[in-house]
Image: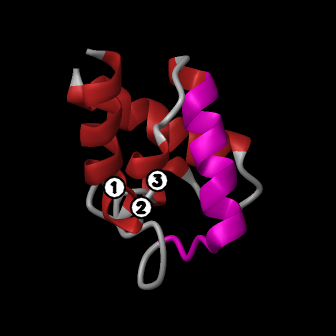
Amino acid sequence: MSEVITEKLKDIIAEKMDLHIQRTEIASDISLMEGGLGLDSVAIMEFISLVEAEFSFKFNEDELNMDGFRDLRTVTDLVATKIN
């Protein structure tokens, strides 16, 4: 299940966000912020909204911290807990 979630997250980044990043450039352990994809706070909020829409749930306020959105692996884990 985690692999499916990660692939959907890669699709969101590559296809739905205006980042000019190819899907093949996105590793599951790549940082979403500095040293990786370089997402700023606005892009992170857009990503969160797209993830919520894709998987049909809302993050709780206490889940919206930088620890859960460090890299794709941590986002995958967080999404998995929400949909299971």
Q: Tell me where the magenta segment starts and ends, as one range.
A: 37-53
**Residue 12 horizontal/vertical position (percent):** 59, 39
Asked if marks 1 and 3 touch (Cβ < 8 Å), the reply is yes
- Residue drawn at point x = 35 percent, y = 52 percent: 72
Magenta span has 51?
yes
Kind of element beneath mark 1: helix
**Residue 33 horizontal/vertical position (percent):** 48, 75
Q: Residues within 10 Å of mark 1 (few under 14, many from 20)?
A: some
- Residue drawn at point x = 27 percent, y = 28 percent: 80
Kind of element beneath mark 2: loop
Q: Is residue 60 left or right of residue 12?
A: left
State whether residue 80 is above or below residue 9. above
Asked if marks 3 and 2 touch (Cβ < 8 Å), the reply is yes
**Residue 82 horizontal/vertical position (percent):** 34, 25
- Residue drawn at point x = 60 percent, y = 60 percent: 44
Q: Nearer the viewer, residue 16 or 76?
A: 76
Toward the bottom, the furthest residue is 35
Residue at image mark 1? 68
Q: Looking at the magenta stretch, what is its main secondary structure?
A: helix
Tell me the CA gap for discs 2 and 1.
6 Å
Q: Which mark is residue 64?
A: 3
The image quadrant where one finds the C terminus is top left
Image-quadrant location for residue 7:
top left
Q: Is residue 8 left or right of residue 38?
A: left
What amino acid does circle 1 point to? Gly
Image-quadrant location for residue 26:
bottom left
Residue at image mark 2? 65
**Residue 51 horizontal/vertical position (percent):** 55, 35
Asked if marks 2 and 1 touch (Cβ < 8 Å), the reply is yes
